[in-house]
């Protein structure tokens, strides 16, 4: 495969980790952010046999939602 097959933003599918987005890639390494497993770094030559391109649209970034603490008024 060509060295520049998976560029930043490419959607991929891995045999073990599922669907993800390529975050960065160079001649030796590739970083992929998987939907269910977070960000993983791979040696490119070893992982290319487990990757295939996906034609899906990238998922929207989820923003963290926190529940606000409710202040309880102290009665004396």
Image: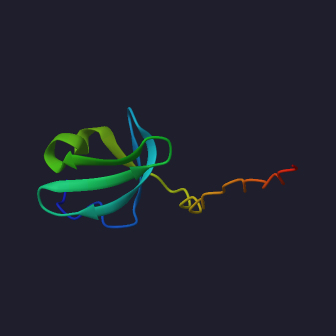
Q: Which of 38 and 32 is in front in this view?
A: 38
Q: State the image coordinates of residue 66 (x, y, percent, origin top left).
A: 66, 55
Q: Which of 75 and 11 is in front in this view?
A: 75
Left or right relative to 39: residue 49: left
**Above or below for 34 versus 68:** above
Residue at 24%, 39% in the rendered image: 49
- The colour style of the image is rainbow
Q: State the image coordinates of residue 25 (x, y, percent, origin top left).
A: 23, 62
Quadrant of the image occupied by residue 16: top left
Which residue extends farthest top? 16
Quadrant of the image occupied by residue 4: bottom left
Which residue extends farthest front? 76
Which residue extends farthest right? 75
Residue at 24%, 55% in the rendered image: 30
Left or right relative to 68: residue 50: left
Left or right relative to 32: residue 64: right
Q: Nearer the viewer, residue 76 or 20?
A: 76
**Above or below for 7 versus 33:** below
Residue at 43%, 41% in the rendered image: 37
Please state the total of marks drawn on the protein image. 0
Q: State the image coordinates of residue 45 (x, y, percent, origin top left).
A: 14, 46
Residue at 25%, 49% in the rendered image: 41
């Amino acid at each position: 495969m060509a060295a520049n097959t998976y560029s930043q933003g490419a959607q991929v599918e891995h045999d073990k980790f599922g669907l993800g987005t390529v975050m960065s890639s160079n001649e030796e390494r590739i970083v992929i952010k998987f939907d269910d497993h977070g960000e993983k770094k791979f040696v490119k030559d070893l992982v290319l046999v487990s990757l295939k391109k996906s034609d899906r649209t990238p998922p929207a970034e989820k923003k963290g939602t926190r529940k606000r603490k409710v202040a309880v008024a102290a009665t004396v």
